[in-house]
Image (cartoon, rainbow, N blue to C red):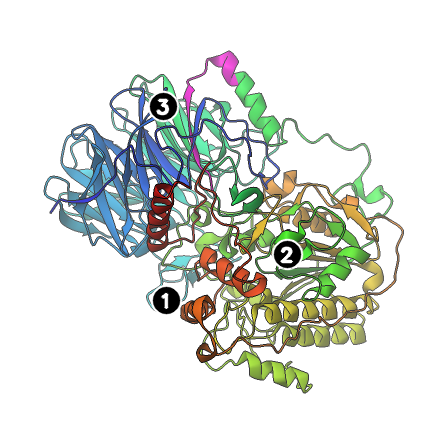
Amino acid sequence: MLRPLFALSAGLALFGQNPETPLRAVSDPGIITTRQSITPAGVQSVFAGRVQGVVFGASSSEIWVLNTGNVFQMDWRANRVISRTKTPSGGMQAIRYDAGAKGVFMAGVQDRQARLVRVSGGSAISVAENLGRNVVGAPGIAAKAPVAVVPLTGDSKAVVIDTATGKVIRPLETGIAPFGAVVNAAGTIAYISNWGGRIPRNGDLTAVTGYAANADRVVVDARGIASTGTVRRFDLGTGKMVREIATGLHPTSMVWDEVRARLYVANGNADTVTVIDTGTDQVTRTIALQPFAEKVAGIAPTALALSNDGEALYVACGGINAVMVIKTRTGGTVGSIPTAWYPSGVALSPDGKYLAISTLLGVGSGWRDDAKKRYVHAVRGSIAVVDLPDMAQLASYTATVAENNHMNSAVPRQAVHASALTPAAIPALRGAPSLIEHVVFVIKENRTYDQVLGDLGKGNGDSSLVMFGEDVTPNQHRIADQFVLLDNFFATSGNSAQGHQWVTQANETDYVMWPGYSQRSYPFDGSDPIAYSSGGFLWDAAVRAGKTVKIFGEFAGTLRGAGINRTALLEEWKAGKDFTQRWNTVAPIEPLNKLLAANFPAYATSVPDVARAQIFNAELKKWTDSGKMPNLVLLQLPSNHTNGTTPGASTPKAMVADNDLALGQVVEALTKSPFWKKMAIFVVEDDAQNGVDHVDGHRTVALVASPYARRGSIDSTFYAQQSILKTIQLILGLPNLSLFDRIAMDMRASFQNTPDLTPYTAVEPKQSLFERNPERTALRGKAKSDAIASAKMRWDVPDAVPSDKLNQILWRNIRGENNKYPGVQRSVFSPFGLDIDDEDREEAEEAAKAAKKRGR
């Protein structure tokens, strides 16, 4: 049964921003952490939150925009909102124009159930409900029949819906994690793309996608990466699958040229487009998307549109912030059009003269409260409408895309072989000899630069935003001061599921970016093979290059189950108990177990980091005794994530201090080992989402320690997480994993070729590691409600709590209730992020309305 969902007048202010006039541009663009430049073509409109899709309406002036929890109908020429309708959220490219209703169909999730909704006239009518449990993909709509097919990504199935009655006709058995559907005009045939590929067969190498008892198993390769992609054809009259067709990895968006019997499929993790003859269901061509002189991984096609004559295919490429123009007859590349950050949708106007392009991340993150308090989840997605360029304009656009990606020419060949060059700490060329033989890469959790180092007294810090200053983090302060201060370093990620991909793969797949893992996994810990980039992991590259590797905790899963008492473990540590035989860890990625320190615990904030440091340092002693240390070591230290103000648990400051002391102990032991003279230590947070920063919400704490570090210096070069990977690759002679480490700035400015072997001495924080949050009965007011809220949150995996709520709890706990929390700035845009659920968003909207009535 069709019933009303939402209706919101276009005259209602959107969080203080006038929805009739979305911003054409912003005066404060955020940092593009991939080092790419953003110079989008066309007429822009900037929105609050992500923009997940765009379609044209009845005319070339009318567009419909799928925004976070909203559908906008706009006259793009005037930048005027005709209507803004509140809708379910979570739909990936889930918007399709409905000419009959002069509106759109959109699919999404509300109240934990997937729905198909029709939006027109400023109202949302629920067409079908209770379709699935969570995230949905791009629906297929028949042009001449009341038929829709909705992929239920989180449930690995699809449903056929009679859009006239709202009745679910039948389910369809898809492959793993279906993303997109296309339906013929008559509503009798559908094709569905399967992000995670086909159902495994006997004898396949497989892995599960998360920890649920009913989690899907996917086919994987020897590295543990999901290795198939498919499209299934269905007879909608019977619901039977007619054929399954192999594609590239991560098939997502599709466009069907029914007249010419051609189906085009974007393969997001293969950087290709598969072309299928729908008369025979045979693959006729695979179009490689390589627009630069040098082949790179990470082009990431996300969306497709086709010219009216079928001669040109427009491919939105999230990795290079561009729309590629492809000749369908030959598969050749004509050129590229620059976009904003990570294009998510592309549509052609009815008259064939314009392209509308949506982008997930748009102009980069914004700020809270004022422009000096930048926040990683202050997402500002965008749309642009571009005149189809002539050849001269397209040539200019193409040159711009290459320049924006720092790939405007092939790398010149060197006159001398790399091995003949003089050894250096950071070699000039990959394969040249390095003065460094051992790299230790330490990965921590969720802090901005200003939260920790804003009080350092040098570099670009803001002490007003410090939450864990020198009393809590003396070792991080001391390492930054004694070695190199990196005050312009950014996390490319926005949460842990993204961050652990970037620090291990220098890339992030579409499955993680949208995200498509919702209700399937949270892939920070190696628990979902669909999340991994086809370019592979840093450790795989090292092993292939003949280097030795040891991994402590990273991608080793999650330490689950009751009975882990953090306080008791701290007391054992204080008493000198030995933890080296306490745990036996098995990683979800089976091949990783060959490299894993099995006695090192997997992720858990219930295990103190000082216990981890003890285990690591015991292993270091074994290396010292044997005279052999691995070339590459990864070490996870996650306690600085905290457990909020949960009654009786370690306080936030105590947990961050534990993390700091553990880091100091590890660095001290390494610097006093015989391997120190040929060592580099890199330390980074996986993301920076748990606080604000006056430069950008992505700016984070990163540290370098090495005899070859430029001691006492400040290096303000623009770096990001992939800069560390690139530097490690140069040291160890490893290949790039993606476009992003290929174009990243290496960190040679932090190094010199003359060593200083002075070791580091750890210092104990003034903050007690044993401090515990008060019990609930001892609290009153906001402190009590914060403690109750913290106790209800899930802490066994990172980011399983509402980040914004946790940030406010930590701020009040550390800075005091009278010190104003950096609130949401509503006069320019509304910075809502991925981790704010619908209830929080609705609550925030009501607060914004109330504030407006009060004249704020």
Residue at the spot of label 3: 76
Residue beneath the point at 51% across and 53% down: 495
Residue density around tag 3, few if under 14, some if 14–19, many if 20 or more, within 10 Å: many
Q: What separation in Å lies between label 2 and label 1 (alpha carbons)?
A: 39 Å
> Tag 1, which secondary structure?
loop
Total numbered badges shown on the rendered structure: 3
Task: Please report contact status of discs 3 and 1: CB closer than 8 Å, yes or no.
Answer: no
- Quarter occupied by residue 72: top left
Q: Quadrant of the C terminus?
A: top left
- Image location of residue 104, percent across then percent down: 24, 34
Highlighted magenta segment, given as a residue range: 379-394
Q: What separation in Å lies between label 3 and label 2 (alpha carbons)?
A: 42 Å
Task: Please report contact status of discs 3 and 2: CB closer than 8 Å, yes or no.
Answer: no
Residue density around tag 2, few if under 14, some if 14–19, many if 20 or more, within 10 Å: many
Residue at the spot of label 2: 466
On screen, 497 above or below 311? below
On screen, 819 above or below 644? above
Task: Please report contact status of discs 2 and 1: CB closer than 8 Å, yes or no.
Answer: no
- Name which residue type carries label 3: Trp
Q: Nearer the viewer, residue 10 or 679?
A: 10
Q: Which mark is residue 803?
A: none
Residue at the spot of label 1: 212
> Tag 3, which secondary structure?
loop
Residue beneath the point at 77% across and 45% down: 748
- Image location of residue 80, percent across then percent down: 34, 25
- Quarter occupied by residue 569: bottom right
Q: Nearer the viewer, residue 125 or 600?
A: 125
